[in-house]
């Protein structure tokens, strides 16, 4: 009898454990399905975010290409305007926007992209002066005064990345102007320490705007912020901290914030920059491409944007190219059938028939003519399609004339390319 009782108890225990096991297993399976659903939803949202930013980048690059191209053409056609303050500010702002777009894309693809700093020589006083000039419209409309002071002890020619430095400083000055109305913003560049060829430089921004609370002070480290009074500011939202932190880290610099509700706020960016040694040679020039003066070359330029056609036409016409411009893929195919071209520049994003489809049709009867893709889209998304379509190379908009000629030169017979001495 005792054995039956013990056996019954064991069976009861086994049954209880089995039911608990099934219950836990079912719970875990439900949780796993729930987690998978959350993961899929998160991945979908992340992909949508990446697609949105890539699309936004494309939409910004297209008009920016026209602005930067026309600015460079004006400077070339009117040498007297080379040192014009407004033209230099326009060029600086275009370069800044391009770097901003590129770095937003870098931050968007944090897992696969890495921002790297260049080491080129640049005139620090000129870079910061252009930065100040670019804020002239903003200060006039907010009734602020932007003061600028440059320490004469600093070597004006330094080695570093002026594009990333400008982006950091523009964010800091923008933040100060945002919190200031009918006031003063002071921007000073000071030498803190000099050791051998390494210069420790402080870029300090102070303002006497309305009180900034400890909570609002962190706006510089929040991705997007909308403080009540700042909604009326010409800048709208605050600093994108993810980009700012990444960029300051790329330069191995540090951002310091001090807030005093009685006197305003102070931001400083401290970084080490190298001065060029007397015996050190650093290439500051972009590759120089010899003009195609000996032979008249024929180019077909395909782009649905009239301004882009004008800029590319002007660039190449100055280099002895006879250019034909067309704004759609269907006409481009007919022109290619009836004419021989030395080079074809093909916009990728066109309505009805895009550049990839146009190129596929051209390749059915013409396998030799180099076709260069012009694209405002992040090329990593199109790389396979570009290769399969038969395109020879690509240029990311906006581009400068030197880069355009370099790519063309690479794909023409008997190219002549040299680097500036």
Image: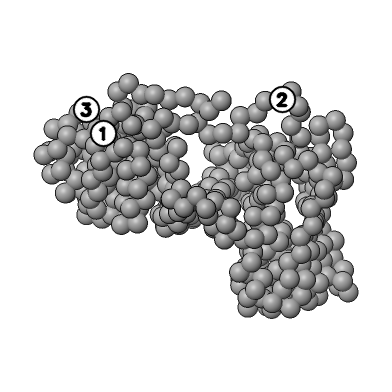
Q: Are marks 3 and 2 in contact (CB under 8 Å)?
A: no
Marks 1 and 2 in Cβ contact (< 8 Å): no
Give above or below for 321 relative to 233: above
Residue identified by numbered label 1: 296
* Marked residue nearer the N-terminal end (1 or 3): 1
Q: Residue at x 85, y 61 (%)?
A: 258
| Residue 345 at x, y percent in the picture | 30, 41
Q: Earlier in the sequence, mark 1 or mark 2?
A: 2
Residue visible at 43% across and 25% down? Answer: 417
Q: Secondary structure at mark 2?
A: loop
Tag 1 secondary structure = loop
Q: Inspect this view and state whether residue 41 appears.
A: no
Residue 377 appears left or right of 119: left
Foreground of the two, 152 or 275: 152
**Disc 2: which residue:** 280
Q: Residue at x 85, y 30 (%)?
A: 196
């Amino acid at each position: 009898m005792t054995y039956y009782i013990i056996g019954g108890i064991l069976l009861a225990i086994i049954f209880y454990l089995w039911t608990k096991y099934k219950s836990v297993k079912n719970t875990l399976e439900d949780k796993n399905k729930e987690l998978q659903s959350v993961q899929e939803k998160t991945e979908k949202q992340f992909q949508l975010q990446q697609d949105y930013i890539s699309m936004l980048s494309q939409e910004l690059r297209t008009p920016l290409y026209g602005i930067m191209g026309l600015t460079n053409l004006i400077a070339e056609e009117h040498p007297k305007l080379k040192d014009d303050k407004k033209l230099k500010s326009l060029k600086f702002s275009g370069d800044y926007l391009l770097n901003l777009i590129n770095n937003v894309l870098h931050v968007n693809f944090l897992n696969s992209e890495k921002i790297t700093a260049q080491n080129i020589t640049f005139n620090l006083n000129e870079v910061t002066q252009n930065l100040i000039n670019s804020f002239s419209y903003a200060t006039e409309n907010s009734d602020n005064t932007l003061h600028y002071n440059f320490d004469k002890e600093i070597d004006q020619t330094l080695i570093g990345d002026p594009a990333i430095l400008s982006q950091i400083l523009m964010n800091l000055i923008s933040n100060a102007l945002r919190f200031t109305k009918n006031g003063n913003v002071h921007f000073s560049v000071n030498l803190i320490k000099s050791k051998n060829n390494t210069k420790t430089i402080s870029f300090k921004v102070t303002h006497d705007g309305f009180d900034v609370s400890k909570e609002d002070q962190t706006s510089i480290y929040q991705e997007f912020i909308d403080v009540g009074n700042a909604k009326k500011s010409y800048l709208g939202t605050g600093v994108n901290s993810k980009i700012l932190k990444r960029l300051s880290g790329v330069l191995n610099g540090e951002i310091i914030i001090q807030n005093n509700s009685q006197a305003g706020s102070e931001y400083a960016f401290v970084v080490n920059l190298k001065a060029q040694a007397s015996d050190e040679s650093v290439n500051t020039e972009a590759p120089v491409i010899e003009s195609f003066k000996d032979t008249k070359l024929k180019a077909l330029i395909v782009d649905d944007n009239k301004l882009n056609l004008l800029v590319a036409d002007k660039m190449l016409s100055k280099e002895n190219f006879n250019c034909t411009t067309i704004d759609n893929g269907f006409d481009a195919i007919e022109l290619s059938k009836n004419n021989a071209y030395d080079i074809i520049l093909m916009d990728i994003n066109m309505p009805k028939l895009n550049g990839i489809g146009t190129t596929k049709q051209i390749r059915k009867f013409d396998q030799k003519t180099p076709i260069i893709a012009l694209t405002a889209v992040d090329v990593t998304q199109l790389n396979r399609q570009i290769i399969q379509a038969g395109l020879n190379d690509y240029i990311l908009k906006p581009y400068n004339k030197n880069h355009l000629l370099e790519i063309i030169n690479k794909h023409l017979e008997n190219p002549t390319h040299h680097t500036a001495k």
